[in-house]
Image (spheres, helix red, strand yellow):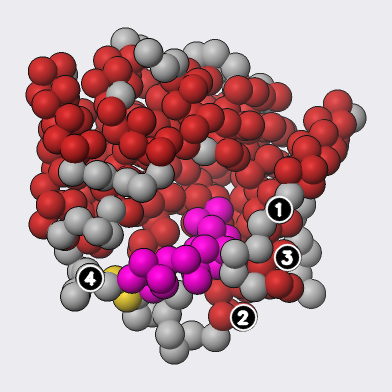
């Protein structure tokens, strides 16, 4: 039987690097939350399934989150895997282990369970509304407003949940809590925009056009840079507000990787990736920065 760590490593290269630096109990809470969001994402990404089946599966998954039902979880997971939910081996294994992940979820502290459950259900419901817009096997977003609404559903809500988990049991962070909450959704949007720009060619091949056709791509790059600046403000507030170093490192690493990925995609086009040596270099540079107690992420100045 795989561990939660095994499933994390097989489903996310970036988060497999960043989640382990979190202190307990946040580490375990965020790891389980990530896997639950990844399960929901797998339904949204199953473009080879009819929209109705994906929507029903998202609703069934939400019901499992609302009320423990091991037998129902095993039955649903078996059906999802039998229906070839994903061509990705790691995602397929995660779907097989839905009962295990849910069992570990229900062992968390009640406050963490409530925060994770509330936000995952909100995101899943939003994903169902997005899938419902699929026409003829294609999903097309028509405006920047639609793009930002999509980013909020799949990533902004994640930023809001993470913020609440960071604040749990840490009264020393109370003063910066309003500042963090105000920027949490934009933090998530920043990372999602970079992913959309990076994966736009592959998404289009699968019938998903997240980038509005009538909007210059330069405008989306500019929005991503602006959002990453807000993410930098969020991280600076964590550092100044008494957050544990592991929380700062967890937040800063994906932002630094996103800055590098954005530059790479803008220069070389969709599909460009950061190499493993580059990821290692960025990771080690961040650790040295934190050792010196310097700002962990850039905040671009207005020109």
Query: Quarter-wise, where is residue 239 in the image?
Result: top right
Viewer-side label of 3, 2: 3
Q: Quick one: label 3 or label 4, which is nearer the N terminus? A: 4
| In front: label 3 or label 1 | 1
Is residue 261 a member of the stretch shown in magenta? no
| Badge 4 element | loop
Of labels 1 and 2, earlier in sequence is 2
Give how far apart the Cα atoms at labels 3 and 4 are: 32 Å
| The disc label shown at residue 216, or none | none
Going from the N terminus, do you reach mark 4 or mark 1 first? 4
Q: Of the residues tagged 2 and 4, which is closer to the observer?
A: 4
Cα distance in 3D space between marks 2 and 4? 28 Å
> Majority secondary structure of the magenta segment?
helix
Q: Which residue is mark 2?
A: 218
Q: Please tell me whether mark 3 sits on a helix, a strand or a loop.
A: helix
Q: Which mark is residue 263?
A: 3
| Distance Cα–Cα, label 3 vs label 2 | 12 Å
Segment colored magenta? 191-209
Q: Quadrant of the N terminus?
A: top left
Q: Residue at x 60, y 22 (%)?
A: 20
Tag 4 residue: 137
Q: Earlier in the sequence, mark 3 or mark 1?
A: 3
């Amino acid at each position: 039987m795989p561990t939660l760590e095994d499933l994390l490593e097989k489903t996310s290269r970036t988060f497999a690097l960043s989640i382990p630096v979190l202190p307990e109990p946040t580490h375990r809470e965020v790891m389980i939350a990530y896997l639950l969001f990844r399960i929901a994402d797998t339904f949204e990404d199953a473009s080879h399934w009819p929209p109705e089946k994906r929507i029903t599966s998202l609703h069934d998954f939400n019901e499992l989150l609302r009320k423990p039902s091991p037998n129902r979880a095993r039955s649903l997971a078996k059906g999802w895997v039998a229906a070839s939910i994903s061509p990705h081996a790691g995602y397929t294994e995660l779907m097989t282990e839905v009962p295990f992940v849910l069992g570990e979820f229900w062992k968390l502290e009640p406050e963490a369970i409530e925060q994770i459950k509330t936000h995952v259900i909100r995101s899943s419901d939003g994903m169902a509304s997005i899938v419902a817009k699929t026409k003829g096997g294609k999903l097309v977003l028509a405006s920047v407003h639609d793009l930002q609404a999509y980013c909020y559903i799949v990533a902004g809500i994640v930023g809001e949940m993470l913020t609440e988990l960071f604040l749990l049991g840490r009264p020393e962070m109370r003063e910066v809590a309003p500042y963090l909450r105000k920027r949490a959704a934009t933090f998530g949007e920043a990372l999602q925009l970079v992913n959309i720009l990076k994966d736009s060619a592959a998404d289009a091949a699968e019938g998903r056009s997240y980038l509005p056709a009538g909007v210059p791509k330069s405008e989306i790059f500019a929005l991503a840079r602006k959002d990453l600046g807000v993410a930098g403000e969020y991280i600076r507030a964590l550092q100044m507000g008494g957050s544990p170093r592991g929380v700062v490192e967890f937040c800063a690493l994906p932002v630094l990787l996103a800055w590098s990925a954005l530059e790479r995609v803008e220069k070389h086009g969709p599909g460009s990736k950061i190499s493993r040596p580059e990821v290692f270099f960025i990771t080690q540079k961040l650790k040295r920065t934190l050792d010196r107690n310097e700002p962990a992420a850039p905040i671009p100045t207005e020109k």
